[in-house]
Image: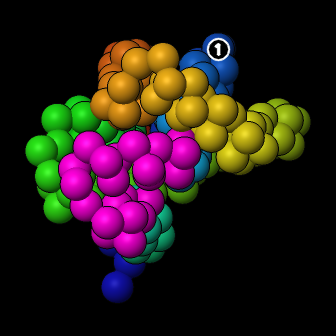
């Protein structure tokens, strides 16, 4: 049964302030880049992770699989979460989960803990794109929607190419932990920008 839209997401309240669409796009593209990068950045570090944890490669491969499975599993919950707490709060929650999962993955002490923390990352990453896309569609008018959606496609094109390159460079020049730690400053910046986004005013007659 569909949930009632929150005041934040009410169509009556969707008059974006000047520049609001650009700020939303900056936040959403940042989150999407992180999510897509993490689908491939770990692949080049699997051998190093296997050596570090003393686990067979078949086990370590679950660090990539757990992320992908969690990401796909949580996508259907995006609409429900937005209906319950609003798009902005859902997006902030997703960013927080992803950034926290990155920090925990960097602190993993075993293959099992790394796999579990990668699943946490995936839960956040899976919400970033659908919720972010919804935020952009609600903020864009008809004339700017096509250009905005085209920009949202850039992370999908860049991420699969940049992920292995960045991951290999970080593993060779630093350590495997940095393939996760690199998300922390980006995630923190995205959280600050997302929190600063203006929330549309409640429609007239809405309960406080």
Q: Quadrant of residue 5?
A: bottom left
**Prevailing secondary structure of the magenta residues:** helix
Crowding at mark 1 (Cα within 10 Å: few <14, some 14-19, many 20+)? few
Residue 66 colored in magenta in the image? no
98 vs 168, nearest the viewer: 168
Q: Residue at x 46, y 44 (%)?
A: 45
Q: Position of residue 160 (x, y in %)?
A: 69, 46
Q: Residue furthest bottom?
A: 1
Q: Quadrant of the N terminus?
A: bottom left
Residue 195 visible in the shown view: no
**Which residue lies under the disc numbered 1?**
19
Residue 19 image point, x, y percent: 64, 14
Q: Residue at x 15, y 52 (%)?
A: 110
The answer to whether residue 178 shows anywhere in this view is yes
Report the side of 197 relative to 120 (left or right): right
Between 89 and 105, the one lying in front of the other is 105
Q: Nearer the viewer, residue 192 or 176?
A: 176
Query: Magenta part of the protein: which range?
Result: 41-64
Q: Residue at x 33, y 53 (%)?
A: 50
Mark 1: secondary structure: loop
Counting labels gives: 1
Q: Nearer the viewer, residue 69 or 23?
A: 69
């Amino acid at each position: 049964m569909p949930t009632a839209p929150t005041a934040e997401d009410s169509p009556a309240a969707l008059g974006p302030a000047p520049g609001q669409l650009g700020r939303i796009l900056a936040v959403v593209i940042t989150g999407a880049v992180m999510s897509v990068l993490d689908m491939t950045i770990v692949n080049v570090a699997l051998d190093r992770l296997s050596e570090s944890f003393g686990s067979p490669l078949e086990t370590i491969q679950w660090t990539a699989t757990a992320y992908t499975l969690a990401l796909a599993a949580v996508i259907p919950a995006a609409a429900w979460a937005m209906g319950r707490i609003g798009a902005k709060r859902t997006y902030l929650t997703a960013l927080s989960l992803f950034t926290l999962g990155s920090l925990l993955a960097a602190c993993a002490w075993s293959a099992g803990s790394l796999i579990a923390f990668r699943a946490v990352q995936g839960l956040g990453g899976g919400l970033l794109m659908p919720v972010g896309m919804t935020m952009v569609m609600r903020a864009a008018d008809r004339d700017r929607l096509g250009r905005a959606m085209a920009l949202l496609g850039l992370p999908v094109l860049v991420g699969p190419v940049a992920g292995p390159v960045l991951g290999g460079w970080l593993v060779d020049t630093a350590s495997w932990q940095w393939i996760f730690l690199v998300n922390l400053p980006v995630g923190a910046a995205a959280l600050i920008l997302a929190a600063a986004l203006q929330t549309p005013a409640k429609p007239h007659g809405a309960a406080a």
